[in-house]
Structure formats: C-alpha cells, structure tokens
Image: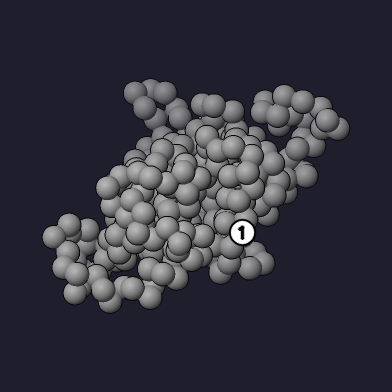
Amino acid sequence: MTPTSRVALRTAGLTKYFRGFKAVSAVDLEVREGGVHALVGPNGAGKTTLFNLLTGFIKPSSGTVTVFDEDVTGLKPEQVARKGVARSFQITSLFENLTCREHVELALQGRTSQGLRFWRSERLLSRYGAEVDDLLARVGLLALSDTPSGALAYGQKRALEMALVLALDPKVMLLDEPTAGMGIEDVDRTIELVRRISAGRTVVFVDHNMHVVGSLADEVTVLQQGTILAQGTYDEVRQDERVITAYLGESADA
C-alpha cells in the first residue's frame, strides 16, 4: 500500500519525565496511513519509551497522541488496542506448552467479549479454524500449527508473535525490534514477512539493523536523547552528518 496524505498516528509535544530525567522531549511525529515508518537511534535515544507512550503502557508527562485524529492520550493499552493499534515486543513472551494454533485462537478470542480466558471450550474456539489457518499461512507457520511454541526456532517465534498482532486486525502495527537476535537468514525472511503483512496497514517499527530499515521504511525518524534529530527517507537521513555522527558512526559513502 502506498502511503497516503492522511496521518494515521500523530504526536504533538510528547514528553515523558522519569524522576526528573527527560526520556522523551517534545516529540512531534507524523506517520502517514499505509506507510512503513522506522524509528532509529543509539541506545538510550528514547525509542522504547516512545513506543510505550504510543501504546498506552506509560502515560506522558505532557503532549498528545492521536490515532486517525482521535485523541488516545493516557488511555490504557487495551483501550488503545481497541482504537486499532497493536504492538509486538522486543522480548518474546509466548507460552511454551501452547501450540501455534492455540496461541492464535487465544488472540482471536481476545478480540471478543470472552477475552483471554484459558477455560476456553473446543466448541467456542473451533469457529476460528479457517482464520487461524489463514493467519498462520501468512506468517509461514501453517505446517507447524500443532507445534508447541517452545519447540520453534527463534525466527519462527517472532513470526508467531506477528500472527498474534495480526489477529487483532489492527490499522496500525508497532513492531519493537522485529529482527533482534536473528541471524542473517532469519533477518531476510522477517523483512519479507513484514512486507507481506504491512499490506493495507500502517507499520511503525524500531530496529538497529540499518539493512532492515533501508529495506522496509518509507520514512525514517532518528531519535537522540529523547528528541527528533532528523526525519526523511532512508537515503536522506543516512546522508545527514548529524545522523552519521550520532548513530551510524561511518561515512555516508561507506
């Protein structure tokens, strides 16, 4: 999907203090509908804090967050999710004894009034069969649908987590370091996976791997010490001397 002029996610003056330390400072961010937007920066730049602010896991000290022009500032994570925003986490958090199918069934049930109730009946969850198969196929795990997550390779676990995000049918997906800890082959597979699942959605992701950023992002925002250092296309920001000095640590011609 080509990015549109409509803004899917916007922050205005977004700021967060932790006991006097300003982790995020007056961030004005616009993410266009249908785009893939990368947040990058050195360790301690405020990327994770910003992600947590966008998804309601922490409340801002000041500023606003809007999703398709609806103010979601200060809402709880489950309330933000109901507005069409879903996220993955940097650290995997799966149930090792549950199969891929059972994970996705629970995620689909979580969209309903039943919530994540572990007493779920086979009759109740059987209605999700076709949708579960579709989601697992989209992330390349259909053949492993009855495999416990504890037996999956690391890259497959990350793919399963993306299936869980997709199960919420979000308008905006936030992916926190989707390729962290992966080998080269898994990284390339994940790049292709994100390309596939981003169709018809807006994606915001954090990643330290500039190959991933350059392969996926329509637009890049570079953070440093909680503020926006630069914004633009990947080619634009990688030529920015401030970015080279603060993050890339190499010549733009390297």
- Viewed as shown, does residue 99 lie left or right of 22? left
Task: Name the amino acid, label 1.
Answer: Arg
- Viewed as shown, does residue 198 lie left or right of 76? right
- Please determine whether, in this image, residue 28 is positioned above or below residue 145: above
- Viewed as shown, does residue 150 lie left or right of 250? left
Residue 214: x, y in percent? 71, 46
The foreground one among 250 and 79 is: 250
- Residue lying at 86% horizontally and 32% vertically, measured from the top left: 253
Q: Quadrant of the C terminus?
A: top right
- Please determine whether, in this image, residue 87 is positioned above or below residue 111: above
| Residue to which mark 1 is pinned | 195
Q: Tell me where residue 85 sits by quadrant.
A: bottom left
Q: Looking at the image, can residue 193 be seen?
A: yes
Residue 100: x, y in percent? 36, 57
Residue 182: x, y in percent? 55, 38
Q: Secondary structure at mark 1?
A: helix
- Residue lying at 47% horizontally and 49% vertically, measured from the top left: 156
The foreground one among 148 and 53 is: 148
Q: Quadrant of the N terminus?
A: bottom right
Q: Looking at the image, can residue 76 be seen?
A: no
